[in-house]
Image (cartoon, rainbow, N blue to C red):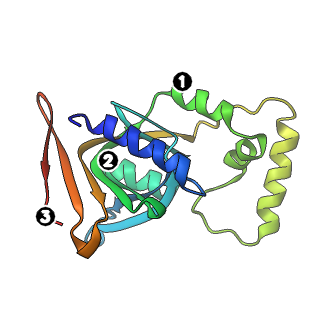
């Protein structure tokens, strides 16, 4: 294939059919730059909720650790690992917020409990005890007895890859690897040593 997004769509469809849990799970790596020392990488598993030729979308609290890190250094990496398929897709690129309309549309599809959690959680901040969070959840449920609007501090980020690498396991550590690199005219691809 000459289009990395077509390749991703094909592999993702196989992952959706073959992975037991969360085929859209991926590791999101960001970099913390606090001025008091060298930049520090940070990584966590998130769920990719959309992708197209513009990039790959994840959602979070903008005030979370990843949100603060993206604000301070708007580049990131994603890594999908589908263990049962013995495949991996890695990418790096610029990351920025999706439109409010896109965030609103996705938020409206979330279960009510997840919507209330987005309001109640001070994501990544210390929590003195679980009961505090549960009380905040009850407060939000009372505040929003009907539809739950999207909080202003919650929404999506789109990673726009500069490159995307496809890795497939082969016997004897003779893996198949190809990398697509964005150019002014589209994408160029080439093989990499295992």
Place of residue 22 in the rendered image (x, y in percent of width and height, measured from the top left)? 57, 54
- The residue tagged 3 is 193
66 left or right of 19 in image: left
**Residue appearing at x 88%, y 41% in the figure:** 142
Q: Are marks 2 and 3 in contact (CB under 8 Å)?
A: no
Place of residue 37 in the rendered image (x, y in percent of width and height, measured from the top left)? 28, 73
125 left or right of 165 in image: right
**Residue appearing at x 76%, y 60% in the figure:** 133
Tell me which corner region of the image, top left, top right, bottom left or bottom right, holds residue 34: bottom left
- The residue tagged 1 is 101
Counting residues from the start of the chain, the first of labels 1 and 2 encountered is: 2
Residue 169 position (above or below residue 108) = below
Out of 86 and 73, give the one closest to the viewer. Answer: 86
- The residue tagged 2 is 74
Q: Quadrant of the C terminus?
A: bottom left
Marks 2 and 3 sit apart, C-alpha to C-alpha, by: 30 Å
Instruction: Please identify the residue farthest to the bottom as the structure is shown.
Output: 172
**Residue appearing at x 27%, y 51% in the figure:** 92
Place of residue 39 in the rendered image (x, y in percent of width and height, measured from the top left)? 28, 67
Could you say whether the residue bearing mark 3 is in a helix, strand or loop? Answer: loop
124 left or right of 42 in image: right
- Indicate which disc residue 70 carries: none
Is any part of residue 63 visible from this angle?
Answer: no
Q: Are marks 1 and 2 in contact (CB under 8 Å)?
A: no
Could you say whether the residue bearing mark 1 is in a helix, strand or loop? Answer: helix
Residue 185 position (above or below residue 156) = above
Counting residues from the start of the chain, the first of labels 2 and 3 encountered is: 2
The crowding category of the residue bearing disc 2, from other C-alpha atoms within 10 Å (few below 14, some 14 to 19, many at least 20), is some
């Amino acid at each position: 294939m000459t289009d990395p997004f077509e390749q991703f769509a094909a592999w993702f469809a196989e992952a959706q059919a073959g992975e037991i849990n969360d085929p859209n799970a991926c590791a999101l790596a960001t970099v913390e730059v606090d001025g008091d020392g060298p930049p520090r990488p940070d990584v966590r598993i998130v769920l990719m909720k959309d992708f197209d030729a513009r990039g790959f979308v994840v959602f979070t609290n903008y005030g979370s650790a990843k949100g603060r890190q993206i604000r301070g250094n708007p580049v990131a990496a994603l890594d999908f690992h589908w263990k049962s398929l013995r495949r991996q897709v890695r990418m790096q690129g610029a990351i920025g917020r999706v439109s409010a309309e896109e965030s609103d549309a996705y938020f409206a599809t979330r279960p009510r409990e997840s919507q209330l959690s987005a309001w109640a959680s001070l994501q990544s901040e210390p929590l003195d005890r679980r009961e505090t969070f549960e009380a905040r959840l009850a407060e939000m449920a009372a505040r929003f007895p009907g539809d739950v609007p999207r909080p202003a501090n919650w929404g999506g980020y789109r990673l726009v890859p500069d490159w995307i690498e496809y890795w497939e396991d082969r016997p004897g550590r003779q893996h198949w690897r190809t990398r697509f690199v964005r150019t002014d005219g589209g994408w160029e691809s080439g093989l990499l040593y295992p």
